[in-house]
Image (spheres, rainbow, N blue to C red):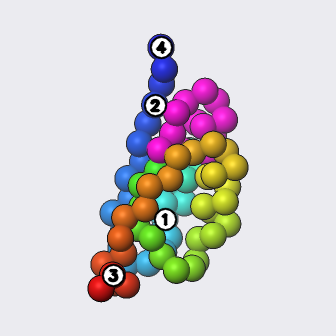
Amino acid sequence: MSRSVLFISTMNGDPWGGSEEFWYRIAAWMSQHDYKVSCCFFEWPSGKEDKITRLKQAGCQLYYLPNPKTAR
């Protein structure tokens, strides 16, 4: 049986906050322990590149929401 999880961040005021720090660490761990992990969060021009790189390296699938602060 395949185990999967989706983390959704709706924080749109800053690139990264306390709850993002929490779930991103869990997401990376789960992905490396036989979970299919997807993460969905607002796209920011900068501020969390190292976190995104770690999630990708761990094997997480990433989905970006349009950032309402920068969308036109």
Q: Quadrant of residue 47?
A: bottom right
SS category of the residue bearing label 1: helix
Q: Quick one: label 2, few (<14), some, or many (20+) residues within 10 Å?
A: few
Marks counted in the figure total 4
The x, y position of residue 5, in whole percent, is: 43, 36
Kind of residue indicated by mark 4: Met
Q: Quick one: label 4, few (<14), some, or many (20+) residues within 10 Å?
A: few
Against 37, residue 42 (above or below) is below
Say which residue label 3 marks.
Answer: 71
Kind of residue indicated by mark 3: Ala
SS category of the residue bearing label 4: loop
Kind of residue indicated by mark 2: Ser
**Residue located 35% across and 70% down the image:** 66
Q: Is residue 34 left or right of residue 67?
A: right
Report how far apart the C-alphas of labels 2 and 3 lie in the structure.
30 Å
Say which residue label 2 marks.
Answer: 4
Report how far apart the C-alphas of labels 4 and 3 lie in the structure.
40 Å
Say which residue label 4 marks.
Answer: 1
Disc on the earlier residue, 1 or 4? 4
**In the rendered structure, are the residues bearing label 2 and label 4 in contact, judged by CB atoms less than 8 Å apart?**
no
**Residue located 62% across and 62% down the image:** 51
Region in magenta: 27-38
Q: Quick one: label 3, few (<14), some, or many (20+) residues within 10 Å?
A: few
On whether residue 5 falls in the magenta region, the answer is no
Disc on the earlier residue, 1 or 2? 2
SS category of the residue bearing label 2: strand
Say which residue label 1 marks.
Answer: 18
Q: The C terminus is located in which quarter?
A: bottom left
